[in-house]
């Protein structure tokens, strides 16, 4: 991995997953069974998202742009900027909007932090001229939402020298969008992070007690986004992980166990994060900061703008921040030897799931998805659904063991399905 970190980042090989049978993960909308998870940095492979983020379609954008710059041309361009998020594209990750001549020299970058309208970006990630720069959004982007993980194009002074401020002029198509709804009855979607390929659910085995409802909701949000799930069980000195492991491994969730006083256990987490872009979520007190500090000792220096992120206690910032992951505990974050991104989400404590469609979740379960083709039209697939073919599928197993395995899998799926509407 050291030899070619960029390559490693783009071709991760999570070993644990290969052993999970009957599981096509994460769910891909239209690309069929062969598709792999949407990888950050591997443009054009992931599932496209067709839904619109309401924040992007503010009607005042066009008027504003026209009155300040004159003519409908810019308005049309601004609309095009919005449209390309909502249309499927067969092309790569480059935006379809036409290159404007004055932006021909734009430099690609990734958003690592956002603080009051100022964006921290990394340019030439993993390359010889890797640097952090500060930027603002160009006015022509209007209210187009830009989130941590977004790949953008920047113009202006991109040297990263102190006092410089570049301009973001384009946002590249996303390979994944992790979304949440404010609450389950409010369909307003918020994008939490873009282009991540793994959701790490940090849960304490005790103090506070694990809540499977919360884990389920994270799994649903991740599968809906086309992301893998790593369940990181902390505080292993206090309780056994067996029960949770048995509950989640059968549905394709990779499980790691850590404890504060065992540095080795942190390295088992690192192994699963190398070469990937991972979003960490967890309730207050589960030990997420402890874990991040162990993984990324120099987190503060790497983030620049947002600086209260890995400190103890309440976080003042609710914005996500991307931290470079050192390949080992002693590597310097500034120099060589980092591979992968760890995105902390201080503000995200739960996932509203009003935006998730049952059929979409079903696609994360290849065997169930196939069996459900026999379901009556409009079947909810819930336990009380009349003639749900999934029940027949359980009955049809060859022997008692097979039947038990199928029953467990169906129960897990139904539990996830109902977690969409349970209080999380
Ligand atoms: N027993 C035990 N305690 C731990 C372990 N890891 C962390 N803790 C403790 O759990 C408490 C919470 O840890 P934090 O890392 O601050 O938790 P957090 O999830 O970041 O919580 P917030 O800072 O509120 O977001 C601290 O007192 C830690 O020392 C562990 O492996 N075992
Ligand atoms: Zn059904």
Image (tube, grey):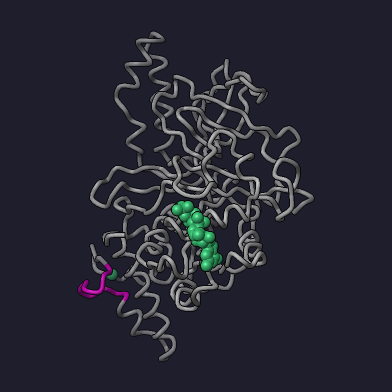
Residue 383 lies within the magenta run: yes
x%, y% of residue 75?
A: 38, 18
The C terminus sits in image quarter: bottom left
Name which residue lies at 61% across and 56% down.
273
x%, y% of residue 264?
A: 67, 66
Q: Is residue 288 visible?
A: no
Q: In this rendered view, identify the residue nearer to me: 413 or 311.
A: 311
Q: In this rendered view, identify the residue nearer to me: 244 or 32.
A: 244
Residue 231, compared with residue 1, is above or below; it is below
Quarter holding ligand 2: bottom left
Residue 421 lies within the magenta run: no
Q: Quadrant of residue 383?
A: bottom left
Residue 168, compared with residue 49, is above or below; it is above
Query: What secondary structure predominates along the stretch shown in magenta?
Result: loop
The answer to whether residue 247 is left or right of residue 258 is: left
Residue 132, compared with residue 208, is above or below; it is above
x%, y% of residue 2?
A: 77, 51
Q: In this rendered view, identify the residue nearer to me: 323 or 174.
A: 323
The answer to whether residue 44 is left or right of residue 15 is: left
Q: Is residue 38 visible?
A: yes
Outermost residue, right direction?
3
Magenta segment boundaries in residue numbering:
381-390
Q: Quadrant of residue 323?
A: top right
Name which residue lies at 64% across and 23% down.
158
Q: How many marks?
A: 0
Q: In this rendered view, identify the residue nearer to me: 397 or 286.
A: 286
x%, y% of residue 166?
A: 58, 22
């Amino acid at each position: 991995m050291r030899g070619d970190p960029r390559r490693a980042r783009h071709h991760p090989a999570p070993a644990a997953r290969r052993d999970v049978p009957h599981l096509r993960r994460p769910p891909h909308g239209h690309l069929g069974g062969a598709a792999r998870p949407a990888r950050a940095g591997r443009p054009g492979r992931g599932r496209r998202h067709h839904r619109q983020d309401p924040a992007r379609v503010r009607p005042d954008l066009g008027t504003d742009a026209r009155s300040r710059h004159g003519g409908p041309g810019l308005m049309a361009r601004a609309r095009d900027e919005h449209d390309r998020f909502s249309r499927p594209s067969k092309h790569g990750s480059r935006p379809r909007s036409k290159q404007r001549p004055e932006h021909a020299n734009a430099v690609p970058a990734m958003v690592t932090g956002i603080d009051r309208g100022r964006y921290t970006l990394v340019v030439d990630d993993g390359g010889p001229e890797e640097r952090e720069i500060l930027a603002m959004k160009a006015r022509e982007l209007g209210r187009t939402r830009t989130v941590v993980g977004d790949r953008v194009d920047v113009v202006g002074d991109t040297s990263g020298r102190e006092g410089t401020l570049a301009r973001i002029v384009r946002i590249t198509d996303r390979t994944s969008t992790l979304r949440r709804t404010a609450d389950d009855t409010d369909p307003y979607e918020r994008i939490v992070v873009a282009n991540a390929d793994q959701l790490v659910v940090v849960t304490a085995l005790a103090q506070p007690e694990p809540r499977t409802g919360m884990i389920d909701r994270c799994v649903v949000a991740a599968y809906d986004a086309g992301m893998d799930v790593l369940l990181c069980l902390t505080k292993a000195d206090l309780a056994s992980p067996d029960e949770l492991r048995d509950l989640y491994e059968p549905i394709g969730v990779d499980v790691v166990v850590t404890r504060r006083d065992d540095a080795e256990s942190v390295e088992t987490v690192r192994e699963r994060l190398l070469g990937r872009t991972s979003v960490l979520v967890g309730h207050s007190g589960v030990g997420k900061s402890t874990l991040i500090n162990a993984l990324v000792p120099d987190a503060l220096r790497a983030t620049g703008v947002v600086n209260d992120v890995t400190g103890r206690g309440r976080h003042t910032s609710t914005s996500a921040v991307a931290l470079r992951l050192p390949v080992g505990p002693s590597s310097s974050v500034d120099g060589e030897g980092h591979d992968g991104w760890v995105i902390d989400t201080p503000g995200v404590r739960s996932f509203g799931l009003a935006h998730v469609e049952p059929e979409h979740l079903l696609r994360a379960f290849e065997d169930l998805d196939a069996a459900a083709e026999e379901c009556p039209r409009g079947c909810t697939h819930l336990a009380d659904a009349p003639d749900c073919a999934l029940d027949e599928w359980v009955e049809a197993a060859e022997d008692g063991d097979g039947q038990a395995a199928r029953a467990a899998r169906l129960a897990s799926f139904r539990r996830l399905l109902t977690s969409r509407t349970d209080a999380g």
